[in-house]
């Protein structure tokens, strides 16, 4: 058994716990959004400020991770709210961002994220992983759908839209506002750093299709469509970006950041100077006209994943899983790290996106 088969979200698991801390009620709704570019529908979760009511559920609860308590299909609270679009990490899912989505919704944001086909739990291939142009289109498609829908658009302040991405999702949100990457630089990075997780994934000879692991040929990054990989995307509706440990950090063209006209907030998980080169963001923050970079020294890359269940490490060991998904940097618990991350993220979006309410 491999870990991706355990990431399958239990979106409608009945909640048997209550939120750890008081906040405004948070609702969640699953919608289907047609992607013309992909020729298929995207599964999208939308979190929102809610009125009391709805069905108590746990989002993202599975054998390893604790779910996030939310109210399914609760009535939406009255008012206009900024919109945040999410992009999850490679091989994960938007359900694994439920903890931060719920925090944002409880603070007065509408939050929407799609599961990106080809790079999500149980549906992930090395060939699809570098296709950032698909992810940026997914983000734009989600925004299009919500703004065109009379019900959702009545609650969205369309002048205040932000984007939050983790890992590969961090790269996607940066590209959505005009940053571009070099295919040659990415190839050179993996040639020089074959031990990096993304590079190992490309050469590992495995993929996940229909929730099953399959064998594939090692993937050569040189076969990626260079024109599509290096094309510039610019969604002018996005006014603020937060990138947490963004992938492709070694491949981004620094000069492209000079033209990004919105605030960029980078968050690296770990000690400055010891961040893996694949996500190290100091040079990107320095290249942008309006950017900042923060570190959480006692966090690691996987600290952005949900809180693990008590027996998760023992369970992963029993199935031969070697990724340290539940190990943090020492000192504080993951829940405490999440509290700090949530405050940083909420504060940044509040500063950039002015709520109508």
Image: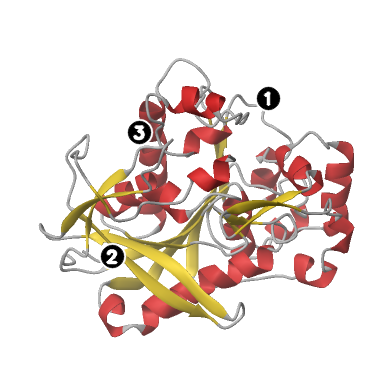
- In-front residue for pair 212/30: 212
Q: Are marks 1 and 3 in contact (CB under 8 Å)?
A: no
> Which is in the foreground here, disc 2 or disc 3?
3
Mark 2 sits on what residue? 81
Disc number placed over residue 189 in the picture, else none = none
Decide: marks 2, 3 in contact (CB < 8 A)? no
Q: Where is residue 147 in the image (x, y as percent from the top left)?
A: 38, 79
Q: In this view, does 327 lie above or below 4?
A: above
Circle 3: is it few (<14), some (14-19), or many (20+) Cα within 10 Å?
few
Tell me, yes or no, if residue 31 can be seen here.
yes
Taking the spot 77% from the left edge, 65% from the top edge, the residue there is: 229
- Residue 347 coordinates in the image, percent (x, y): 37, 45
- The residue singled out by tag 1 in the image is 274
Pick the residue in front: 167 or 70: 70
Mark closer to the chain start, 1 or 3? 1
Gap in Å between the C-alphas at discs 1 and 3?
23 Å
Secondary structure of residue under mark 3: helix
Looking at the image, is 133 positioned above or below residue 86? below
C-alpha span from label 1 to label 2: 38 Å
| Secondary-structure class at tag 1 | loop
| Of the pair 43 and 2, the residue shown nearer to us | 2
- Quick one: label 1 or label 2, which is nearer the N terminus? 2
Label 3: which residue? Answer: 339
Q: Nearer the viewer, residue 297 or 43?
A: 43
Could you give the CA–CA distance between mark 2 and mark 3, rounded to whole angstroms?
22 Å
């Amino acid at each position: 058994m491999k870990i991706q088969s355990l990431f399958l979200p239990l979106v409608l698991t009945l909640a048997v716990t209550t939120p750890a801390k008081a906040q405004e009620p948070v609702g969640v709704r699953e919608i289907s959004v047609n992607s013309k570019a992909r020729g298929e529908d995207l599964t999208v979760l939308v979190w929102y400020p809610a009125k009391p009511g709805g069905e108590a559920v746990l989002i993202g609860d599975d054998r390893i991770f604790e779910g996030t308590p939310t109210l399914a299909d609760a009535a939406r609270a009255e008012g206009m709210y900024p919109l945040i679009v999410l992009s999850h990490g490679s091989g994960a899912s938007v359900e694994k961002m439920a903890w931060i989505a719920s925090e944002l919704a409880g603070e007065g944001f509408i939050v929407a994220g799609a599961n990106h086909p080809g790079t999500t739990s149980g549906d992930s291939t090395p060939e699809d992983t570098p296709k950032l142009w698909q992810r940026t289109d997914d983000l734009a498609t989600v925004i299009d759908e919500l703004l065109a829908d009379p019900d959702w658009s009545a609650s969205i302040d369309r002048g205040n839209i932000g984007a939050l991405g983790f890992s590969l999702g961090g790269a996607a949100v940066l590209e959505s506002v005009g940053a571009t990457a070099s295919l040659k630089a990415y190839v050179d990075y993996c040639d020089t750093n074959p031990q990096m997780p993304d590079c190992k994934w490309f050469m590992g000879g495995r993929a996940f299709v229909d929730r099953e692991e399959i064998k594939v040929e090692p993937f050569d990054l040189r076969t990626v469509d260079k024109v599509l990989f290096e094309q510039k995307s610019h969604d002018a509706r996005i006014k603020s970006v937060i990138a947490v440990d963004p992938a492709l950090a070694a491949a981004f063209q620094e000069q492209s950041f000079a033209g990004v006209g919105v605030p960029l907030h980078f968050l690296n998980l770990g000690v400055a100077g010891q961040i893996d080169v694949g996500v190290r963001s100091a040079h990107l923050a320095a290249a942008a006209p309006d950017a900042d970079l923060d570190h959480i020294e006692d966090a690691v890359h996987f600290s952005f994943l949900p809180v693990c269940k008590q027996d998760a490490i023992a369970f992963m060991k029993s199935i031969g899983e070697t990724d340290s998904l539940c190990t943090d940097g020492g000192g504080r618990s993951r829940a405490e790290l999440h509290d700090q991350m949530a405050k940083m993220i909420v504060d940044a979006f509040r500063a950039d996106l002015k709520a109508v309410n």
